[in-house]
Every structure is written in structure tokens, then in C-alpha cells.
Image: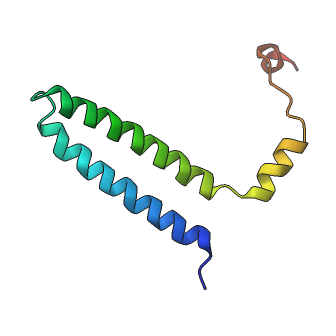
Amino acid sequence: MRGPEVNEKELLQKRIQQTELQIKKLNLNMNSSEVCEDLYNSLIIQKAVLKKQLKDVSKNPVIESIKKIIPHREKLICDYFKG
């Protein structure tokens, strides 16, 4: 049986594909009016949001909580030249 995250992943992927198709169709009429340009920009933003949601769904919540607990030491430029 598939988990709910798989169905959500598939749904997000389909929505991204639909948004990309709309963007391609609108790209042809991009110079025709300001309304088309505004719609095009909103579709680009919507696509970015959907991709971010897809990325968040793909993350393992257990690993993410462990990463928050364990402190991360930033690597400095001088660290590359040691030893």
C-alpha cells in the first residue's frame, strides 16, 4: 500500500507539469498584453512554490529533526588551508 506522501508527491508533480504547460502556452502571447505578463509571472511563482513543496515532501522528517539537534560547524576559508 502506498503512503500518503507518495500520493502527495504525484499530485505535486502533476500540478508542476500543468503549470509548465500553461507557462509554455502563455509564453507565446507574452508581449501581447500586460495581463498576460502578470499571469505569466504568477505562474512562475506558483511553479516555484510547488517545487518547494515537492522538495519538502521528499525530506525525511526524522533526519531533519536530527539535523536541527546536532550543531553544524561552519567551514571557514582558513580550514581548507590547514594541514
In the rendered image, the residue lying farthest to the left is: 32
The quarter holding residue 83 reads top right
Decide: is 73 above or below 66: above
- Compare residues 55 and 19 and report the one nearer the observer: 19
Q: Is residue 52 left or right of residue 25?
A: right
Q: How is the image coloured?
A: rainbow
Residue 62 pos. (x, y %): 80, 58
Q: Count all numbered tags in the image, as a single digit.
A: 0
In the rendered image, the residue lying farthest to the bottom is: 1
- Compare residues 36 and 71 and report the one nearer the observer: 36
Decide: is 60 above or below 32: below
Which residue appears at 60% of the width and 67% of the height?
5
> Which quadrant of the rendered structure holds the N terminus?
bottom right
Q: Is residue 34 left or right of residue 67?
A: left
Residue 20 pos. (x, y %): 30, 49
Q: Is residue 67 left or right of residue 48?
A: right
Decide: is 8 above or below 81: below
The quarter holding residue 36 reads top left
Residue 77 pos. (x, y %): 76, 15
Which residue appears at 77% of the width and 50% of the height?
64
In the rendered image, the residue lying farthest to the front is: 35
Which residue appears at 60% of the width and 72% of the height?
4
